[in-house]
Image (cartoon, helix red, strand yellow):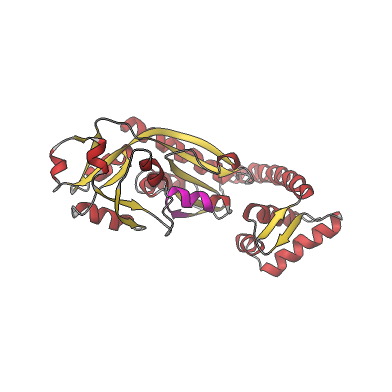
Amino acid sequence: MRLEQLYHIIAVAQTGSISMAAERSYISQPALSSSVSKLEIELGVPLFRRSNYGVQLTETGEAVVEKAILAIGLLEDIKAIAEESKHALTGNIHLAVEPFISNTIMVNALTTFKCRHPHVNVLMKVGESNNNLRDIAAGKADFGVLMKTCELPEEKDLFIKELFNDELVLLVSRESELAQSLSVTLAEAMAQPLVLYNTEFATDCGMSKLLKKHGDFNVAYRLDSFPMLERVISSNLCAAFAPKCMSDYFLSRESIVPLEISDAKLDVSIVMAWTKRHHLSLIEKEMMETIKSHCSISKLVG
């Protein structure tokens, strides 16, 4: 049994796919498949059930992967001791981040983290929260920073760490008649043509699910470009709901005004999420702590 084989079976278990696990492991698909098969032969039991729909752990496989994660965790701790003595952390972090967070908190968090750990590579994908959850579940992202607008469908398979509570405000153009006031009613807000941030053609975004609880609404645009989202709001073509923590960011744009909802409170939580199948490395824990510290600062300033 070789150490890399443990990494390989964990990668397959996390992604449910030989090809995706090979991509994450930076080896060819045949090489990873051979590595897993050789381990199964050595152990004398199948660890995965293979089908046209992917691969799933057998009952024995679940127990083996659970122990493999513990073993890798101990190895990472050993590496951490060595890295700390060298004062230089290395490695890769794959992040999935909500756009409203990426343009505010994450800018400062990433800057701070890279100053402290210049040899760590951070790959950050900006996407809508439900899409980010799918990437986390598929093993494409190590963890995510999400806007939780309702109960998460995969919550039983996730670790959820709340960063802070917030509420939604309505973003409108400074040219909008609504901008003459500091607030709007929920009915007025829901009556506006809205733009929602979507990173897929699917329309099951978290914002849609939250708004449906309060009645009908009109979606004029679904965009996967944050600058374009800002542009259509600034042009007075539509409005958008966003976390209140972003109010200062939009006020700095001068052409967009955040309005509070006067007769309702649309609660959201900003959370970190990662799958229970993923062992957090030291660099990932460091990144999480950096994000948490900047969320605390942002909350105090707000």
Which of the 4 image quarters holds residue 51?
bottom right
Horizontal side of 284 relative to 170 (left or right) equals right
Which of the 4 image quarters holds residue 158?
top right
Position of residue 35 measured from the top left corner of the image (x, y, whole percent): 75, 62
Q: How many marks?
A: 0
Task: Report if residue 274 lies within the magenta region.
Answer: no
Which of the 4 image quarters holds residue 73?
top right
Task: Report if residue 132 lies within the magenta region.
Answer: yes
Viewer-proximal residue among 259 and 291? 259
Residue drawn at point x = 72 percent, y = 57 percent? 4
Viewer-proximal residue among 204 and 274? 204
Position of residue 163 measured from the top left corner of the image (x, y, whole percent): 45, 35
Position of residue 204 measured from the top left corner of the image (x, y, whole percent): 43, 50
Residue drawn at point x = 65 percent, y = 66 percent? 27
- In the rendered structure, which segment of residues is drawn in magenta? 124-135
Residue drawn at point x = 70 percent, y = 45 percent? 69
Whether residue 299 is visible here, answered yes or no, is yes
Whether residue 87 is visible here, answered yes or no, is no
Q: Quadrant of the N terminus?
A: bottom right
Horizontal side of 196 relative to 191 (left or right) equals right
